[in-house]
Image (tube, helix red, strand yellow):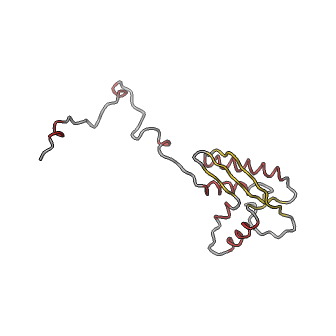
Amino acid sequence: MTDTGQRNRPQETLTKESPDEALGKSSTTKRGGGAPATRGRTTIADGVVEKIAGLAARDVDGVHAMGGGLARTFGAVRDRVPGGSGAKSVSRGVKAEVGEVQTALDLEIVVEYGVSIADVARDVRENVIGAVERMTGLEVVEVNIAVSDVKLPDEEDDEPQGRLQ
């Protein structure tokens, strides 16, 4: 049985001229439509933003450590175990909620005794917002900071990393 409907249909040429090309203009739109940078979606995981924020916060003078006492204790033990993951310690004390174009962050920090907590919090916000927005392109709508402890000069250091150097 033959399909006569296909035989009577005119064949399309593979090289059609667009109206612009017929007028001597070259078309700037390529196959797929739009600029290559606009094709597709980029999603950023909460953990990525948490790591960026954690590193940026630790880089501020006056920040001794990140996270509450219990989290720091468990983290210090985990970091000393051979084969343990040090990646979690980078985001310890940071919680991010990431949307399509915005993010909000909650940070828990331990400050060094003698520093102005207000100044440290301001510096942490500025550093975190700058790093996250520059690296991810997300708008940081808020950075909430909870100061959970003050590191006294004579206290034993339960987290060896404090400020990254």
In front of the other: 15 or 85: 85
Residue at the left extreme, as displayed = 1
Relative horizontal placement of residue 120, taking residue 40 as reference (left or right): right
| Residue at 74% from the left image edge and 68% from the top image edge | 70
| Residue at 76% from the left image edge and 58% from the top image edge | 109
Residue 137 placement (x, y as % from top left)? 61, 45
| Residue at 66% from the left image edge and 46% from the top image edge | 140
In front of the other: 59 or 40: 40
Relative horizontal placement of residue 43, taking residue 157 as reference (left or right): left
In front of the other: 80 or 117: 117
Residue 60 placement (x, y as % from top left)? 76, 54
Quarter of the figure with residue 85: bottom right
Compared with residue 49, is residue 141 higher up or lower down, i.e. above or below? Answer: above
Compared with residue 127, is residue 80 higher up or lower down, i.e. above or below? Answer: below
- Residue 165 visible, this orientation: no
Residue 63 placement (x, y as % from top left)? 78, 58
In front of the other: 23 or 120: 120
- Residue 108 visible, this orientation: yes
Residue at the bottom extreme, as displayed = 82
- For the C terminus, the quadrant is bottom right
Compared with residue 53, is residue 10 higher up or lower down, i.e. above or below? Answer: above
Relative horizontal placement of residue 89, taking residue 113 as reference (left or right): left
Residue 110 placement (x, y as % from top left)? 79, 60
* Total marks placed: 0
